[in-house]
Image (cartoon, rainbow, N blue to C red):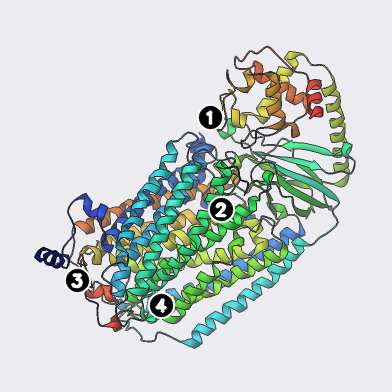
Amino acid sequence: MNNLKQLRRFFLWPTLLFCHTASADFSFWNLRKGVTEISREVYDLHMLIFYICCVIGVIVFGAMIVSMILHRKSLGAEPATFHESTKLEVAWTIIPIVILIGMAVPATSTLRDMYEPGEPDLDVEVRGYQWKWQYTYLNDDPSKEIQFMSALRTPQDEIQNRAGKGEHYLLDVDNPLVVPVNKRIRFLITSNDVIHSFWVPDFAVKKDAIPGFVHESWAIVEEPGIYRGQCAELCGKDHGFMPIVVHAMEQEDYDKWVIEKQDEAAKVFEIVGKSWSTDELIAKGEEVYARNCVACHQTNGQGIPPAFPSLVGQGIPVGPIADHIDILLYGRAGTAMQAFGQQLNAAEIAAVVTYTRNAWGNNMQDSVQPKEINVMMASQ
Amino acid sequence: MNAVVEEHHDDHHDHGPAKGITRWLYTTNHKDIGTLYLWFSFAMFFVGGICALGIRAELFQPGLQIVQPELFNQLTTMHGLIMVFGAVMPAFVGLANWLVPMMIGAPDMALPRMNNYSFWILPFAFGMLLSTFFMEGGAPNYGWTFYAPLSTEYAPPSVTFFIFAVHLMGISSIMGSINVIVTILNMRAPGMTLMQMPLFVWTWLITAYLLIAVMPVLAGVVTMMLMDIHFGTAFFNAAGGGDPVLFQHVFWFFGHPEVYIMILPAFGVVSAIIPTFARKKLFGYDSMVYATASIAFLSFIVWAHHMFTVGIPLAGELYFMYATMVIAVPTGVKVFNWVATMWQGSMTFETPMLFAIAFVILFTIGGFSGLMLSIVPADFQYHDTYFVVAHFHYVLVPGSIFSIMAAVYYWLPKWTGNMYDETLGKTHFWLSFVGINVTFFPQHFIGLAGMPRRIPDYALQFADWNMVSSCGAFLFGFSQLLFLFIIIKCIRGGQRATERVWDGARGLEWTIPSPAPYHTFSTPPKDMAEAHG
C-alpha cells in the first residue's frame, strides 16, 4: 500500500510541482523566508546572488550554444585563427571583480547584522547530546532555572514502516523549546559529546555545538508558531533522528508555560523525596528506558555490540549495584554512554537502574530508592 | 669482458613487455603503470558506486528499508573516501603516467622504480580500507571528513586501519607527485620551454606541487588522531585541554587544495580536447597557465569557508568570504577562454567533445553554487544540507569524472590502436549526462528546502525529489557498465586508428604510431611547433 502511494507520488510529481508553484509555496524547493528580520535578509541575499548567477549563466551558456549551432563543421564553418587577446582577458577579469564586489557589499552588511551584539531578553543554553538536545533557561536564581531534554517523538513503528507516517514525521519532539515572540533570545550552544549543529531554518540560525566551546547565536521571532529544524552535523548513528522544534508563543502564554514548568520542578522534588515500591520503580524505569536507552541498547536490551553492549545476563546490570548507579550518573568516558546524572532526575535514575536489573530475565531482585541516589550525587 | 658488452648491448635493444603477471608486478614502464592506475581507479569507481547506490536505494523513500543507520554512515564515509582517493586521484595519476612523457617527448618517467612502488602501495591501502567492512564495529562511519571527536573517542575500532590506509595513500601520492615534477622539469625534449608545454602538463605540474604541500598535512592530522586514540594525547579532546576545531582547521588546510587537486588536471584535459574538435588553437594559453597557478595559490588561503558555522569571529568570516569569492575570477577566466576557443571554430561533436562541453557547462553550474556557498550569511542556511552535496557533486562528477571519461575516449585510440565504437560512446555520454543531472539537480531543491546531508531517513516534504534523485543515480550507475563494455570492445579490436587519430589534434603524442609503441621518444623529438598545437 505504502509502495503504491510512493509510486503514485512519483508519477504525480510534475503535477505536485505545478500545484506548489501555483500556490506560491516555494518551501518545497527553495529557502524559506522565515520569521525573523535576519532570515528575510538572508533570503533576499540568496535570491540576489541566485539571479546574478542566472544572468551570467544565460550569457556564458548562450554564447556556447550559439557557437555550437553556428560554428560546426557540418555547416561548412571554417575555423578562425585568433587565439589571444589581452583586452578580452583584462575585460573578463575586471568585470567579474566588479560583480563580486556588488555581491560582497550586501553580504557584508547582512553578516554584520547577524553579529550585531545586543542585550538578550532571554538566555537559553542549547546542549547537544547523542542524539537529543537539552535546553536550559538560564536564570540568576538557580531554583527558577528550567531545564529539560528534547528528543524525537516519532515512534519506531513509523520509522521501520510498520505504521503510517505522521504529518511531522521525524520533525517532532517530546518537549519543544518554548520561546516568547518579539524578544531577543540568545542561544548559548555547546555539546556534551561529539559535534552537533543547532539549526532552525526559519530563524536562519545554524551554529555548531562543539564540546569545550560555547558559541552564541540569537533570534527575534516575529510570529507565534511552531518551527522545525534538524541537527546539521554528522554526530553518529542517529544523526538523522534529533530534530529541533521551537514553539514561539505570545508573552502571556509563555509566562504561563514558565510557571507550569517551575511547578513541575517542585513536583519532581516531592517525587524524589518519597519512598517507591519496586513495582513502581520498574514501571517508571521501563518508560525512562524507552525514552533514553533504546537508541543504543535496543528494546530487548541486546544492544549493538561492540559499540553498544548488551545488558542481558552480563556486565553492569548483573554486577554490583553501586557500579551500575555510577555508570548511569557519570557515564563512561570515550564511549557513547553519557553521564545521565545531568539529564535525568534521581527518581528516573533509580527507576531505570531497578528496571534493567530485573528485565529480560536479569532477575537481580534488588532495587534502589531515589533518596539513595540523591545521597550519592551529593557525596561526589 | 665480451659478456658485459653483450649485456650492455641487450639493454638498448628495443624490447617489448615481459610476459605474464610479472609484467604488471615488476613493470617500470610508464604506459604499463598508467594502465594499472586507470584500471585500479575504474575498479574503485565501481566499488564507490555500489556504496552510492546503497545510499540512494535507502533514500528512495522515507522510512528505513534497506540499510540501517549504522551501515548507512559507513556507506557515506566509504563512498567519499573511495571516490576521492581511490577513483578520481589514481585516474589522474594514470593519465599523467600515460601522457606526460609522450607530451613532453620523454622516453619514460624520471623515476620508474618509484613509479612502480607508488602504484603497488595502492591496492594494499584500499584492501585494508575495504577490509574494515568485515571488522567488529564496522567500517569508518564518521564521514569522509572524519571530524574529531566522532572519529577519535567515538570511532569504531577500525579507525586505526583507516589511519594506516590514509598514510599509505599519502605516501603513494607524494611519490607520484615527485615523479611528475622531476619528469616535467628535467625530461622535456630539448627546446621545449615551460610555456610551450601542453596545458595538461602544466596543470599536472601545479597539481603535483599542491599534493606535495598538503599530503603531509593530512598525514599529520591522522597521526594526531592516532596519538589521541592510542597514546593518551588530547589534541582534539576538549576534556584534556585540546581543541576539536583544530582538527577542522588542519583537515581543511589539506582538504581545500585537495579538491583542486581533483579538478586542475581536468582543466588540462578539457584544454586539450576543445581545441582539437573546434579545430582552433586554445584561446589565451598564457592566461590559462596564470589562472591555474592563481587557483592553486588561492586554494591555500580559503580553507575555513568549509567551517563558517564553527563560530569564527566576524573578521575571520569576512576574510574567508572575500578570499573565496576571488577564486571565481581565475575560474571564470578559464571558462571564458574555453568558450572563446569554441567561438568561430569548426566544431564536430565526437564523444570526447561531448564530455568536454558538458564539463564546461555543468562545472560552471557547480561554480555558481560554489559562489552562493561563499556568501557567509547564505551559507548558514546551505551549510551541511543537500545543497552542498549537489554543489560538490556537480564539480566532481560532471567535473572531474566527465573529464576523465573525455580523456579516456580521446586517447583510447592512441593507447589501443583501435577506434572505440562512436555510437556506443555517444549513447554512454547521453545516459550519463541525463543520469547525473536527474540525480544531482533536484538535490539543490531538497537542500534549500532544508534536508541535512548524511541522514538515512528524512521528513516527508523531501520525498518527491529524493525519489527522482535515486532514479537518476541508478541510471548513471548502470550506464557505467556500458563504459566498461566500450573500453573492452575497443581493446579487443575495432577500426584501426591513424597516427593523428583526430584531424584537429596537436601535440607530440599524436606524432607517434597508434597504438603507442612500448618505448617512445628514445631519441627526443625535434619539432617543437607541434608541442602545444
Q: How many marks?
A: 4
Residue B472 in view, yes or no: no
The residue mark sitting in front, 4 or 3, is 3
Relative image position of residue B260 (x, y in whole percent): 48, 64
Question: Disc 2 on helix, strand or loop?
Answer: helix
For numbered disc 4, what is the local secondary structure?
helix
> Which residue is at 70% across, 47% downward?
A212
Q: Chain of mark 4?
A: A
Q: In front of the other: label 4 or label 1?
A: 1
Instruction: Please give the residue where the numbered disc 3 appears in the rendered image.
Output: B513
Q: What residue does disc 4 label?
A: A67
Q: Which residue is mark 2?
A: B386
Residue type at the position of mark 2: Tyr
Quadrant of the rendered image containing residue B448:
bottom right
Q: Residue at x 26, y 76 (%)?
A: B503
Q: Chain of mark 1?
A: A
Please, what is the three-letter code of the amino acid marked with disc 3? Pro
